Image (cartoon, helix red, strand yellow):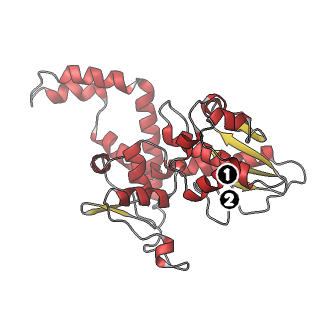
Amino acid sequence: MSRTEVLSAAARGGPEPIRTHWVSVGDQRWPPRQLFERALGVSRTEFISHYAIRQLRRLGFPTSPLPQELGEHAEPELPAEPPAPRSDLGSAVKSFIDLHEFFDREDLSSRVVRLEALLEGADSETVGARVAPEGMTDDLIRGALLVRQHAGRINDLIHAAMIVRALPKILEPGERIVRRPSLASGNDRSRKFDLETDRRVAEFKAAEWKGRDAMRKRTLVADLVGLVLERDHRRAELYVLGRMPIDFLQRSSSTMEWALVRSSPHLRHAYEQRFGSAALTVSQFTAGPAAGVALRELNELIG
């Protein structure tokens, strides 16, 4: 990621409300994860704010301090935003429905191509009549902007909801959750896994892969390594959305060195201490040291 990519991302729409951390770009403050997600095109469920802050600082952007820089008991600089008024939420729901109907009628790419053809040669007197049947109204713009405002954390919602809905289907009779689950993306030091019971530890990856998934691949491998290193006597499971992540783990010839290059120094050191060379391929690691980790598809649980 380059500074130019961050500036370009900041130019494409405005920031979401600041909750705790921020990064300053020009005269605006942004949530680090929103800006990092937009600049890289990677779901914010794949990284935590602290990682985004460190990368943005490296490019010269001012940010809020990290907790360890303020002290262990430091309070967040800014309070959480209050919930949106009920009327706004109702408008957002209607806008979601209107947008769904708009996209459902025709592929957007086809519509854009037709619009481009219609606009060629138009002037101020004819442009309105040419595009009127296409539905590009002021209400559509306002609705899309409102949807984007409320959809900023949709990936976090998916991550939390996937775990909550999966739990009744995976917990066995008598199995107890022994530590508060980590429903938000990223685990704190007191919770090494998304789920810990008296019988298993598990990580959940709810990102939908689309073919260019370098960051997703790296975080997936990092979670797999964490499960191998930290699971103790309990069985370990890694839940993913779709078949592509599993195929990557089982077939990839990428090296573990490549996969862990952006992981925390602590994880890389623990890997080297336990397994030695990182020249092992991802598929070799999956079939060898990680053979005891069960790979599960969330689609089979959620339906």
Above-or-below relation of 91 to 115: below
Farthest right residue in view: 174
Residue 108 as seen in the image, left or right of residue 73: left
* Mark seen at residue 226: 1
Name the image quarter holding residue 281.
Answer: top right
Q: Of helix, strand and loop, which one carries label 2?
A: loop
Callout 2, which amino acid? Lys
* Mark seen at residue 181: none
Residue at image location 56% in from the left, 43% down from the top: 257
Q: Of helix, strand and loop, which one carries label 1?
A: helix
Which class describes the residues within 10 Å of circle 2: few (<14), some (14-19), or many (20+)? many
Q: Which residue is mark 2?
A: 192
Residue at image location 73% in from the left, 41% down from the top: 290
Estimate the x, y position of residue 107 in percent, counting from the top left.
40, 24
Above-or-below relation of 242 to 55: above
- Residues marked 1 and 2 touching at CB (< 8 Å): yes
